[in-house]
Amino acid sequence: VGCGCNEAYQMGSYFFWKEKKLGKEGQLASLPDKAKAKSASTATFPDISKVQTDGKTYLTPAETRRELLRCMKNYKVTQADFAKMVGTSSITKFMKSGGEFGGEESESYHGLAAICEKVRIATGKAKSKKRLALEQEVGKKKKQPFLGINTNRKMWMSADSYAAKDELGRTVIKRG
């Protein structure tokens, strides 16, 4: 099967085809580099030094990772920058954790969630429906909001209990 052409012939024909499409003046070199174009389009990270929060964590570890990745995509900031903000050596292990609650014991989780909250406030982004409902549920109490249960942990349950999602998307234990 095939035309009996060798690899050198195929590479040569591809070179001439590409030259025909792009021109002999090297239009390929004048095309913008994707990496340069991407870094030029990202904005500087907002100043969050004076932003105050209530100290509660309203994001699960998975939501925190999602927000951090969104920040790294939209702003000139890296994992190392976030690690310096939190005061830890590295956040790589937290970022590589999987699942909704993967990395919840990480020393950097609550600090990173606070950074995400500060960025939300600094950029003027509105609170999510889930966030508003969690605030209402907690009220003015000093306890952390209930973000759901980690189904990867072992737990005792009665025979008629099961894990299900509630109206906020949290995993909860239901009976019956």
Image (spheres, rainbow, N blue to C red):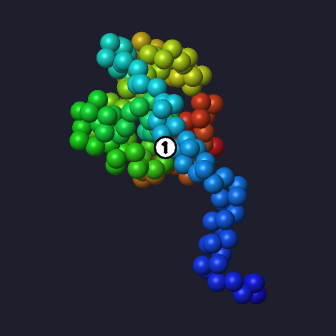
Which quadrant does the C terminus fall into? top right
Vertical comparison of 46 with 149: above or below: above
Q: Residue at x 49, y 43 (%)?
A: 35
Q: Residue at x 32, y 30 (%)?
A: 111
* Residue 67 in view here: no
Q: Nearer the viewer, residue 120 or 75?
A: 75
Vertical comparison of 7 with 93: above or below: below
Vertical comparison of 14 with 143: above or below: below
Left or right, 75 with respect to 109, comes to right
Vertical comparison of 126 with 59: above or below: above
Q: Residue at x 31, y 34 (%)?
A: 81
Q: Position of residue 44 (x, y in %)?
A: 42, 25
Which quadrant does the N terminus fall into? bottom right
Res. 64 image quadrant = top left
Q: What residue did someone put label 1 on?
A: 35
Q: Nearer the viewer, residue 56 or 138?
A: 56
